[in-house]
Amino acid sequence: MRSPEPPPLPEEALEERFLAATGPGGQNVNKVATAVQIRLDVYALRLHPAVFARLKALAGSRMTADGAIVVTARRFRTREANRVDARLRLAELVAEAHIAPVRRVKTRPSKAAKARRVEAKAARGAVKRGRSRPILD
């Protein structure tokens, strides 16, 4: 069951820092801090306990002990692109936590289905026995 659309991430719950990035960019990498690190204060979102538990499990090591999720984006060469990428990944993570897992309903095979299975196994065994060498006494 999917819950209603998760609320947008409030700006006061986000904190951005720009870091020196590795990877493509040439000399630019050494001069400009293009990577972005966003911290989301999960407690400021006031999530339902079940959603909070799913978010904590999904975030894994990205969640700190003080209840903040840290996402770092350094895929692109520009600050703006990395900023959009980090915010999008964070929003997707929170949206995924709002989706409740579908519970599996346990089923049992019927007596007739069990009997058919046993008969099929016996028939298959007879075919295999027929392939063996004949016993000469």
Image: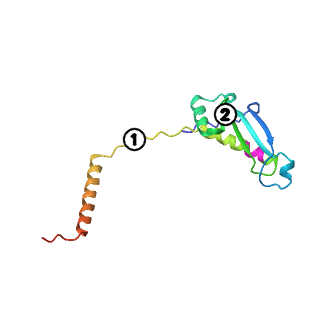
| Amino acid bearing label 1 | Lys
31 vs 97: above or below: below
Query: How would you classify the magenta stretch by its main secondary structure?
Result: helix
Q: Which residue is mark 1?
A: 106
Residue 116 falls within the magenta-colored stretch: no
Q: Is residue 28 left or right of residue 127?
A: right
User: Residue 6: x, y in percent?
Assistant: 65, 36
29 vs 42: above or below: below
Q: Which residue is mark 2?
A: 64
| First to last magenta residue range | 82-86
| Amino acid bearing label 2 | Thr
Q: Is residue 111 left or right of residue 28?
A: left
Splitting the image into 4 quarters, where does residue 7 fall?
Answer: top right
| Residue located at (29% from left, 54% from top) | 117
For residue 137, which numbered disc appears in the image?
none
Callout 2 crowding tier (Cα within 10 Å): few <14, some 14–19, many ≥20: some
